[in-house]
Amino acid sequence: MSDGEPAKPPAARNAGLQVGRVLGVPIIVQPLWFLVVIFIAVSYAPEVRRRVPTLGHTASYAVSLGFVLLLYGSVLVHEISHVAVAKALGMQVRRVVLQMLGGVSEVVEEQPGKASREYMVAAVGPLTSLLLGGLGLAIAEAFRHDTVPWVLAEEFAFANLFVAAFNALPGLPLDGGRVLRALLWQVTHDKARGTLAAGWIGRGLALAVVGLAVAKPHGWGNSTAGSLYLIVIAVFMWTNASIAIAQAKVSTVLPQLDIRAMTRRAFPVAAELPVAEAVRRARDAGARALVVVDSNGKPSGLVSEAAVTALPAARQPWVSVSDLARPLADGLTLRTDMTGEALLQAVQQTPATEYLVLDQADAVCGVLSRTDLVAALQAAGLR
Ligand SMILES: [Zn+2]
């Protein structure tokens, strides 16, 4: 945050190791990634020995590790292609995360966004993998079969061709799903409808992957480890398709949300005031939330309703509000002019039970409680 970046969402803080920057975008590697690299390297070594019989035991592990690193290198190139196109179209990319199942480029979507841009950012991924696959095939041609460079180039080619084909499938969260979503969005002018369709296809594809893991057709996950890997992929796909579907449903009811209507009246209290007295004064004033203010009246903290409820009545006269208050961090302040979508994004980035709501003139408008927001979403027709 020293270089003036906005506050990062909590997920960004403990997500892994930053290994570098490409095009100004941080590249993050999740700790689990290292385990998966070792796992694949070890389980793939016997296959290397089978294909290059002259290779020794130790050397086969080295070649296997080299293959895995090439594989993840191409995943990185795939992600960087998304980043490059997004940047060329004037979009921001928060970071690239290398996960155990591949990579994710976190493109910051401004609202409402543009279908054509999403289409191009998504489509370049499978195309890049296709290109890498072709490159691998060409390189493999140049070497004698049963040599190490041939095995590496051929496996590299097949892995990338597989990634290209699989990622082009038209279900979320795959690139093909994003392309389909953007196309439907462009045609129907309804982003949520595109997301729902691509999300349901994504769920269908996840079930198909489970079927593949169970049926174990020849050469396809015909080992237990392979089946396990397919199941993990299926769970990942199902989960992310479901998140997309849920978000699409939320986005259809969001325009109906009015942040002012959900905001509770807040009562300003000094930090040293006992909780019992603060609660009494707020109740007398007809307010349902407590905001801690400094001597200039500037808000400095929020007292959560749950924290007050959890404090025994007998102790309330002896505890000051500052002991219960959560200091106002960046993400805890919302504004009355936020649209439904921006509001939801802000709440997702900084999970909390209460948020301070300011009006356009920076004056305290009140407090938005998460329970009130959830209730409003439910009332608007969600679950
Ligand atoms: Zn991609």
Image: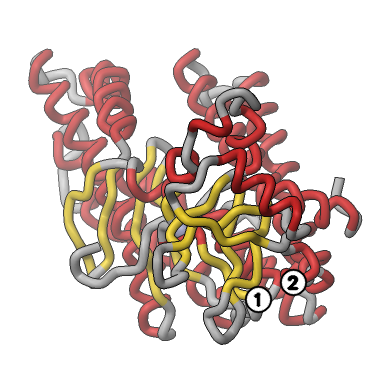
The N terminus lies in quadrant:
bottom left
Q: Position of residue 200 (x, y in %)?
A: 77, 50
Under circle 1, the secondary element is loop
In the displayed structure, would residue 21 be above or below residue 72? below
Of 114 and 102, the residue lying toward us: 114
- Left or right position of 328 against 215: left
Of 265 and 188, the residue lying toward us: 265
Asked whether the beta carbons under mark 1 and mark 2 sit within 8 Å of each other, the answer is yes
Residue tagged 2: 260
- Left or right position of 259 against 1: right
Near mark 2 (Cα within 10 A), the count class, few <14, some 14-19 or many ≥20, is some
Badge number at residue 280: none
Q: Position of residue 358 (x, y in %)?
A: 58, 73
The quadrant where residue 83 appears: bottom left
Q: Work out how far the residue at label 1 is from the one at label 2, CA to CA, in angstroms.
A: 6 Å
Q: Position of residue 24 (x, y in %)?
A: 23, 70
Residue at image coords 74%, 60%: 285
Say whether disc 1 or disc 2 marks the residue closer to the N-terminus.
Answer: 2
Q: Indicate yes or no: mark 2 CB to ligand 1 under 8 Å.
A: no
Residue at image coords 75%, 54%: 284
In the displayed structure, would residue 224 be above or below residue 63? above
Residue tagged 1: 336
Of 142 and 135, the residue lying toward us: 135
Residue at image coords 79%, 57%: 249
Q: Position of residue 18 (x, y in %)?
A: 22, 49
Residue 198 in view (yes/no): no
- Left or right position of 281 against 137: right
